[in-house]
Image (cartoon, rainbow, N blue to C red):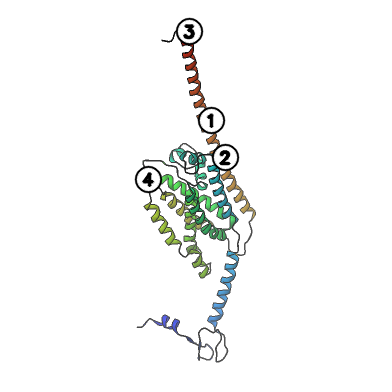
Amino acid sequence: MYKGNDDAEAARPFRLCERCGRPTPVSLPQCVNCGAISIQSVVAEEQERVERQYARALFSRATPVTYALLGANVGVFLLMGIVSGGSEDTNTLIAFGAKTNGLLQSGEWFRLITPIFIHAGLLHLLLNSYALWVVGTQVEKLYGSARFLLIYLLSGVGGVAGSYFGQIILKKPFDPPSVGASGAIFGLFGVLAVFGFRYRREMPPAIRRAMTAGVLPVIAVNLVIGFSIRFIDNSAHIGGLLTGAALTLIIPYIAPGREGVSKTGLLIIALCLAVIVYCFAQAYQRMKIVSESVMNITYSIYGTYRTNRTNRTNRTYDGTDP
């Protein structure tokens, strides 16, 4: 069966030497007859050297923000279990900053950020933590710590926004609290999916394939699972995915050789941390206001009850109570 010239050339164990014209093994860079070095071998060797240097510089980068985010997720999860009814209690989720359409519409915009760090149950936390550890380290090595944190937060906001509009478009009858880092994580998947296309002429082919291989099937499988299971907020996944893909076209990655965090990067990290702290502080203030209101109502009801009971007792003692 004829397979074409390219297949025949690839299967041939010998090549013709450029200098002497005699056959020599393809696997050897030098001709066994005259000792001449193949130009193709030189080019291939140089390409392999460049790819090795590129991969070494890229994959040796530290990923502190990914581990800091993992620690923050675990910290919030433990705090929910310590100070309140646990991470699966609806009132606790809302008190810590879960997203609901009604609360967003009432002006509680801090809920665009706080749900990214809240998880409902240990399994939810473990699944998202594993996904963040796998894909987060890759994206942070590509973009550096500052840009990665910015992409993560904006993708998370995009996920919350997707959940908000999905609730409206699908006309869901209920408004349950929505939490989790999955919107931000899908944003990171979107980054990897678009990254190989945008930088296809800049990155070595082998590195590009290694970074993006298997991303599209993973995205497709997770979206199918999200559509199949009722309690999964797939609108948040789609919102985060589209946000991350769009950010890849806007925010440039940091090529190997530009190591360290610049002053601009430090400013980005400081602003992101300030926004996170501010949003959780707003959630705490809101929780205090609600708690004080509940206590005031309780004291008011109790006070009314005591007053009525005292009046009834006095009337009984005076003989006026029928």
Going by the numbered disc 2, the residue's amino acid type is Ala
Local SS, label 1: helix
Question: Where residue 272 appears, x then y in whole percent?
Answer: 58, 48
Closer to the chain start, of discs 4 and 2, is 4
Pick whichever of labels 1 and 2 is earlier in the sequence: 2
**Contact check, label 2 and label 3, Cβ < 8 Å:** no
Q: Marks 1 and 2, Cα distance to the nearest angstrom?
A: 16 Å
In whole angstroms, how far apart are the C-alphas of marks 4 and 2? 31 Å
Q: Nearer the viewer, mark 4 or mark 2?
A: 2
**Mark nearer the viewer, 2 or 3:** 3
Q: How many C-alpha atoms fall within 10 Å of the one at disc 1: few (<14), some, or many (≥20)? A: few
Dot 3 or dot 1: first in sequence order is: 1
Q: Which residue position is annotated with label 2?
A: 281
Say what amino acid the circle numbered 3 marks.
Asp
For residue 202, above or below residue 225: below
Instruction: Calculate the distance from the C-alpha at mark 4 to the C-alpha at mark 1.
Output: 36 Å
Q: Which residue is mark 3?
A: 318
